[in-house]
Amino acid sequence: MSTTTQDKTTTVVLGYLKAMESWDAGNLAPFMDDSYVHHTHPTALGLPDRNKQEYIEHWRKTVIPMFKTWDVVVAQKVSDGSKVTLLV
């Protein structure tokens, strides 16, 4: 992955994290296409896979009410040439 592609990928991921911080679940939608499927891990939790709309509703009805504040801090950026991983 070129540095420019890594920078663009990092920008998209940071935008997604910013959408999570906004407390508006609808802000997540632009980062997902209609084939989006969210898998919850560990699978031993027994939670179902969720499509785009189900995930946004889950975020709105379950995740947001669980937290009083939500600040995402990127602790480290790791790149191996084919992917970018942000440790938060």
Image: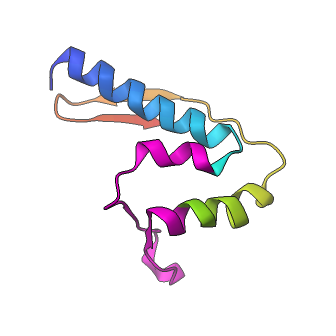
Residue at 78 percent of width and 60 percent of height: 66
> In the rendered image, which quarter contains the N terminus?
top left
Q: How is the image coloured?
A: rainbow
Q: Does the magenta-highlighted stretch encompass residue 49? A: yes
In the image, the segment drawn in magenta is 26-55
Q: Is residue 35 left or right of residue 40?
A: left
Horizontal and vertical percent for residue 52?
45, 62
Residue 3, quarter of the rendered image: top left
Horizontal and vertical percent for residue 41?
46, 68
> In the rendered image, which quarter contains the C terminus?
top right
Q: Is residue 24 left or right of residue 84?
A: right
Q: Is residue 62 left or right of residue 86?
A: right
> Does 36 appear above or below 45?
above
Q: How many marks?
A: 0
Name, please, the residue furthest toward the top: 4
> Does 75 appear above or below 29?
above
Residue at 61 percent of width and 65 percent of height: 57
Q: Does the magenta-highlighted stretch encompass residue 12? A: no
**Residue 88 can be seen in this image:** no
